[in-house]
Amino acid sequence: MRLSRYFLPVLKENPSEAQIASHRLMLRAGMIKQQQAGIYSWLPLGYKVLKRIEQIVHEEQVRAGHIPVLMPTLQPADLWQESGRYDAYGPEMLRITDRHGRDMLYGPTNEEMITDIFRAHVESYKQLPLTLYHIQWKFRDEVRPRFGVMRGREFYMKDGYNFDLTKEDALHAYNRHMVSYLRTYERMGLTAIPMRADSGPIGGDNTHEFLVLAPTGESEVFYDAQVPDLKLGDREVDYDDREAVAEICTEFTTLYARTDETHDEAVFNELPEERRKTARGIEVGQIFYFGTKYSEAMGATVKTPEGNVPVEMGSHGIGVSRLVGALIEANHDDKGIIWPEGVTPFHVGIVNLKQGDAACDSACDALYKALVQKGFDPLYDDRKERAGAKFATMDLIGLPWRITVGPRGVAANLVELTSRRTGESEEMSSEAALARIQEIYAAHL
Ligand code: 5CA
């Protein structure tokens, strides 16, 4: 993309309504525009990041054997009356009436609807196990929408639902989700720690939240200092191997890590003092096992040789739009965003220091073409702007790598490759720069 033809409405001033870095930077970098409290338009740059995150979430769910579907945002009230949650959900639910006077709602989550799909189409235990998920907009009329996309009223969420015959099978599905989530966050360059949590209105007694440590997080968390060092890395996971999957879960959930809802001071204090950490965290996902809560209420049963039994279920969510904010909270400095390679909106920025100079222009064009040809998505700043302004824009929008082309270097076929994270620059030929970019992204493409 050439910046002169793109739509990147960056703001010079800090927006006064933004209290935290991610909200401020998303507005300044032209990623989002607020339309109403907690409701945003996603402008091109923000939309790209959202889609990158969504893609990683899809890939890791499919890898775990889960099947994508798409349910509507609007749901009939009757389904929620069946589960008993229509009244229980309270004012957070946005209720709508259609022209025929039928009660509907904008879905805050989809347990009821997925259970309805299941009971309509699945009859036999032989069709299990089954895990369906979708990535769809949700609406919760939060009392205090704030921090931009972090706590929106409309937000984008991945929600998955497992249907199993036995509790043991359902707990394997729970574990599968835990491991697939760990992989998902790691691919985005995030450390998200599974913590014992409280199930709230979803119900059930087995639940973990995934928290990204950040001073601006809304949850208070307590953990063993060794927990953030746990990494899945590039180990192969066989999601059908129950023991292997359970072992990984044990590895990631044995050390102390809890939110304030489940924190137990006495257990925490058994840790040596230097390992006791208290911090703030952003909840980027939550998994639940709740057994037959919905299947019993809604008649989702399967035939077995012993008769009809209600299916064992769980639900598992990732805050896709919240992750955009969480990633920025975890990756920024005073100049702007620093995207991890896995989610960056453009792989590399090209800055032409002397737009209009024949040699610089043609070197940039050649580099741009070569990058595209190798499958990269570069952003070429071809505007007639001062170098300082071009650098400031690149720093603000946070592309992890920048290639600078100027009149001095171009004569000797030299460009400068700069890391946004370290600020370090290296002079090299444009071929060498291209090779370095290929090397850097080899793990991500
Ligand atoms: N049905 C279950 C699992 S699918 C469920 O709804 N879980 S949840 O309530 O924990 O939401 C899943 C994730 O969505 C949360 O971990 C959080 O990351 C994200 N989320 C929840 N509320 C909001 C909100 N108001 N704005 C942005 N993201 C949100």
Image (spheres, rainbow, N blue to C red):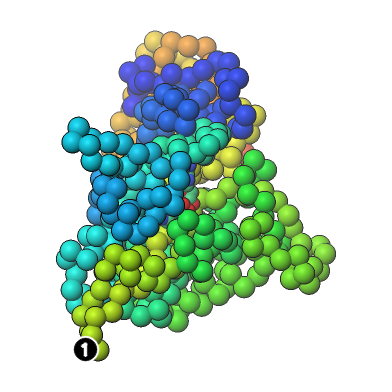
Q: Is residue 26 left or right of residue 330?
A: left
Indicate left or right for 110 with 340 as reference: left
- Picture coordinates of residue 371, whole percent (x, y): 35, 36
Residue 421 location, quadrant: top right
Q: Is residue 403 left or right of residue 310?
A: right
Q: How would you rate the neighbour count of disc 1 (Cα within 10 Å): few for under 14, some for 14-19, many for 20 or more?
A: few
Residue 111 locus on image (x, y percent): 34, 58
Q: Is residue 159 left or right of residue 114?
A: right
Q: Is residue 369 visible?
A: yes
Along the line of sight, the residue nearer the viewer: 320 or 146: 146
Q: Position of residue 315 (x, y in %)?
A: 40, 61
Q: Nearer the viewer, residue 13 or 282?
A: 282
Does any portion of residue 137 appear in the rendered image?
A: no
Q: Position of residue 429 (x, y in %)?
A: 46, 34
Residue ranking furthest to the right: 273
The kind of residue tagged 1 is Pro
**Up-down: is 73 above or below 268?**
above
Residue 263 vertical placement versus 32 (above, below): below
Q: Could you say which is closer to the camera, residue 60 or residue 345?
A: 60
Q: Nearer the viewer, residue 414 or 239?
A: 239
Does dot 1 land on a helix, a strand or a loop? loop
Relative height, residue 347 to residue 169 (above, below)? above
Q: Quadrant of the N terminus?
A: top left
Which residue is identified by label 1?
A: 305
Instruction: Name the residue located 21 percent from the left edge and 75 percent from the top edge.
Output: 127
Please report the residue visible at 30 percent of the width from the left and 75 percent of the height from the top: 310
Looking at the rendered structure, the number of numbered marks drawn on it comes to: 1
Taking the spot 59% from the left edge, 36% from the top edge, the residue there is 332
